[in-house]
Amino acid sequence: MQSQDSPPTPFRGGRAAAEAALAAIDPARYGSSRNHLDGAVTGLSPWIRHGVLTLPEVRDAVFALLDARGYGATPEGRAEGQRIAGKLINELGWRDYWQRLWRRLGDGIWHDLEPLKTGHAAARYSPELPSDLAEARTGLACMDGFSRQLQEIGWLHNHARMWLGAYVVHWRRVQWQAGARWFLQHLLDGDPASNNLSWQWLASSFSSKPYIFNRANLERFSAGIYCRDCPAAAAGTCPFEASYEALQEQLFAAQAPAGTSASASASASPWRANTGHSASSAPRQPLLWIHGEALGPANPALRAHPGRPALFVLEAAPLSANRLRFLQECAAELPLQERRGEVAEELLAAARAERADGIVTSRAVDPRIAAIAAELEALQRHEPPAQRLPLIALEPDPFVELDDSVDLGRFSRYWRRAERRVWAGWGQEPA
């Protein structure tokens, strides 16, 4: 609901803006203030979501900053550096965790991973987002402010996302999927894995209990900027003005037992477009397919084949003007052509026009990318085998090396395996 006179998002797409934001990070201030709306959050998520910055690049930038400040010189200094930057590295781990779950679950991230712990049946929740929420006219200054910021700026502090999400699901009794779709339409960092699984966490379909908040919590972490001018607060009708115990009794029925964790859920078939091709049969003159998960110079296809023609296809999708602008700004800084249309058809046409002997891309987690790969194969089904163009997907640099046996049932289980390995890389030369 961006008005014609509202300013565009302050986030600009592309590597130059991303590097400026990365240079400004302060791990110590982040660790101590990240939960406050005016805290020293990094704001890197829009660029990380689209691969303009990668998790390994951010990780290594944090390590370099610690080294520059002398923390890597002694064991005591390294321990202090890990304490200072631990929260920021942990946050990078959350994104890696969500991505690993997405790869395992595929489109299953759109379905409840566990039964709700609210005591209410799923059928009790509305499938549609109420219009007053989307139009920012609930009469609650906080929720209306968050709604406007989401739609006008395309970014929200994580605490604001949690408050708004809890209000949608628990106070308005709306299915989390409706809120997730709303966020994905507008958030510049709208990544289905981080987005959907965070919604499931607060809804209690991927956590041990539903997340709620009260007015005291909101005032503390927002510095009271919403409550002081809120009509509901002035009238004594604020729905969040209660103890946690009272809100639990008001919002939820008898608690249901905890369900099965995600590690036991059905897994999706992984994309294996890069298998079955020896070095001798790999394309030598490929077209490079640059998709929305890898719009940065670390894209392995760009690194493996510098100077080769590259194509980014912008699909028709329910994205806000801010999201489309950000994507186009990211693409504009790369050596590629941009087209609109059906991705598989555009890729095949461009590859034929360039006389390419195959298509090379970066391996992605999004099941939509695998579906496009299947469409590309189907388009060539009736061509002679010798004329079919293979699709090769190259692996991006990992945040941390872990095998597929890692338990993803909860973040804590993943992080017990990952944290030590991540920090063991401090002091090593980046790959």
Image: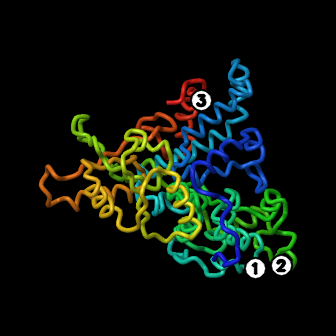
> Is there any visible trace of residue 364 in the rendered image?
yes
**Colour style of the rendered protein structure:** rainbow
Q: Secondary structure at mark 2?
A: helix
Crowd around label 3: few <14 · some 14–19 · many ≥20 (10 Å): some
- Is the residue 100 above or below the residue 235 in the image? above
Residues 389 and 264: in front is: 389
Q: Residue at x 56, y 64 (%)?
A: 325
Given the image, on which type of amino acid does mark 1 rest? Gly
Residue on which the image places disc 3: 423
Q: Secondary structure at mark 1?
A: loop
State which quarter of the image contains the N terminus. bottom right
Whether residue 396 sits left or right of residue 169 in the image: it is left
First in sequence, mark 3 or 1: give its number.
1
Residue on which the image places disc 1: 139
Q: Position of residue 374 (x, y in %)?
A: 28, 58
Q: Position of residue 233 (x, y in %)?
A: 84, 74
The mark found on residue 121 in the picture is none
Identify the image quadrant of residue 245. bottom right
Given the image, on which type of amino acid does mark 3 rest? Trp
Residues 428 and 116: in front is: 428
Q: Residue at x 52, y 34 (%)?
A: 417
First in sequence, mark 2 or 1: give its number.
1
Identify the image quadrant of residue 154. bottom right
For the residues labelled 2 and 1, the Cα–Cα distance comes to 7 Å
Residues 225 and 406: in front is: 225
Q: Residue at x 84, y 59 (%)?
A: 223
Q: Position of residue 382 (x, y in %)?
A: 14, 61
Given the image, on which type of amino acid does mark 2 rest? Pro
> Is there any visible trace of residue 267 in the rendered image?
no
Q: Are discs 2 and 1 less than 8 Å apart at CB?
A: yes
Q: Position of residue 44 (x, y in %)?
A: 63, 50
Residue on which the image places disc 2: 231
